[in-house]
Image (cartoon, rainbow, N blue to C red):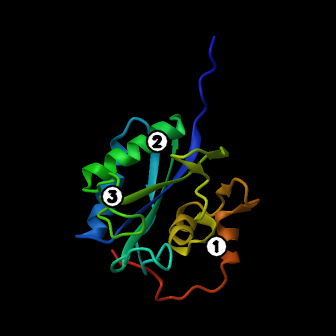
Amino acid sequence: MPVAPSSRRIAIAAGSNLGNAAASVRRAFDALSKSPLIHAPRLSPLYQTEPVRVSPDGPDPGGAYVNAAIVATSFATPQQLLELLQQIERQGGRDRAVGASPHGAPRPIDLDLLLVGDLTLDTPELTLPHPRMHRRAFVLVPLADIAPDLQVPGQSATVAQLLARLGPLDARAVRKITP
């Protein structure tokens, strides 16, 4: 008899810098909350963050982003979760078709699967944990608000410890948005 998968704690980064970015992040959270794949989701406070250019010759990232983190539990596989996130992105107006929007360009919604329990994965479609999350204040600050004790696989550190390793943050670069 097959063994049922166990529920795992998951973390998702959400961001937007086109249109009403805060509303886009909240709509994405609402869509995740309605999915049978997601249980007990929590949304961090929203933050306004400065855009990050992915490379010196990368596209202009546009204006400031609204970023947040989402933690939940799920029995779903990483692939099922990735498909759900991409479906919500499409519903939010993001076109991931080749050439439609270069990596690092402005976007109406961006959902990144940061981690799925203690799983590690490296495929062409998905790397877990997210390979740059431990270096990104716009990911760690909101995530630390709702899951500071969350252990990041491969880092031997919690979210709070990773955030502390970044050192002092520029208050202009990551600002909490008042409700």
Residue type, label 1: Leu
Residue type, label 3: Gly
Rendered-image quadrant of the N terminus: top right
* Mark 1 secondary-structure assignment: helix
- Asked whether residue 31 is in view, the answer is yes
The residue that mark 3 highlights is: 99
- Could you tell which of marks 2 and 1 lies nearer the N-terminus? 2
Q: Residue at x 33, y 44 (%)?
A: 87
- Asked whether residue 117 is in view, the answer is no
The answer to whether the residue labelled 1 contacts the one labelled 3, judged by CB atoms less than 8 Å apart, is no
The residue that mark 2 highlights is: 81
The residue that mark 1 highlights is: 163
Q: Residue furthest right?
A: 156
- Quadrant in the rendering for residue 22: bottom left
Seen from the viewer's position, the closer of residues 18 and 146 is 18
Residue type, label 2: Leu
